[in-house]
Amino acid sequence: MKTIWITGGSTGIGAATAKKFNENNWRVIISSRNENLLVKTKENIIKNSKNKEVYIFPCDISKRNEVYKIVKNIEEKHSIDLALLNAAAYSPNKNQDFDIENYNLLIDVNLKGTLNCIDVLKNFMKSRNKGHIAIVSSPVGYTGLPTAGAYGMTKAGLINLAESLYFDFSKIGIKVSLINPGFIKTVSTDKNSFPMPFIKTKEFAAEKIFYGLTKTNRFEIYFPFFFLRILKIGRILPYRIYFYLVKKFTGL
């Protein structure tokens, strides 16, 4: 039985993806800061499942010592075949304010937290010349968008990081994947006050993630396809045209 470790696994995409992997006979280990939510998520996953191999490990990924203890504990029992680094903080800028505390919070969790996980996982996976790390980013990281300065900056960093590690880690037997979901209905996106085109359910996201990570060899897994293709075009437009289109369609 293969083992997946999912950070940010107590709610949203993480919880739905944990359920999907459980249904496909994977050993699932979920982490987040909220132990109570982890317990409820585990109960929900195994309630009607024949596969009871679901374990919880509360962890604050912004603290490297906690990440090391958790991963070491898991690795002493089961090698982590796949790590889905999904934990993230989300807090849109209000009224276009520049809030340095918000920036620092998102940097600590989204960037430094992911780096902490990769740093620890790399050593264990390198020792057996085998492993798979999947980094969950966001299409907000493709280009700058209104009110998304802090969140988008961290997600852009993760996209760049995954692209670089794809080359570097291939030399030590570690596969790197990048996941960019579009708008998915979760507690986080419920905070948004703007229209969210092509919004999908977390179950839809889980299906796409499972298929992409286990049935294909693609580096980037992104969905929904049509919406994300449109956003990708924004990366190659001249700024003058890009800024005009963003203002026109967002009204911001």
Image: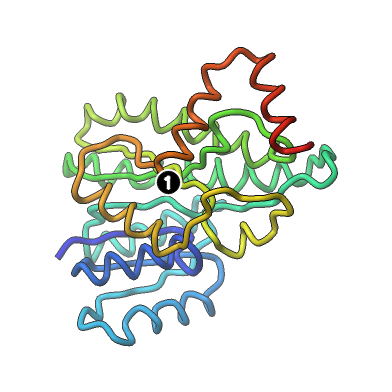
The way the protein has been coloured in the rendering is rainbow
x%, y% of residue 20?
A: 30, 66
- Front position in the image: 161 or 152: 152
Instruction: Say whether residue 148 is left or right of residue 207.
Output: right
Instruction: Say whether residue 185 is left or right of residue 174.
Output: right
Residue 151 appears in which quarter of the rendering?
Answer: top right
Residue underneath mark 1: 224
Taking the spot 33% from the left edge, 64% from the top edge, the residue there is 73
x%, y% of residue 14?
A: 44, 61
- Front position in the image: 32 or 59: 32
Q: How many marks?
A: 1
Taking the spot 14% from the left edge, 65% from the top edge, the residue there is 1
Q: Amino acid at mark 1?
A: Pro
x%, y% of residue 135?
A: 41, 43
* Above-or-below relation of 11 to 156: below
Taking the spot 65% from the left edge, 15% from the top edge, the residue there is 239
- Outermost residue on the left side: it is 1
Instruction: Say whether residue 205 is left or right of residue 22.
Output: right
x%, y% of residue 23?
A: 24, 71
- Front position in the image: 36 or 236: 236
- Outermost residue on the front side: it is 248
How crowded is the residue under tag 1: few (<14 C-alpha within 10 Å), some, or many (20+)?
some
- Outermost residue on the bottom side: it is 47
* Above-or-below relation of 125 to 161: below
- Front position in the image: 105 or 178: 178
Instruction: Say whether residue 160 is left or right of residue 55.
Output: right
Tell me the quadrant of the picture where the C terminus can be found: top right
Taking the spot 43% from the left edge, 39% from the top edge, the residue there is 226
Q: Does dot 1 land on a helix, a strand or a loop?
A: loop
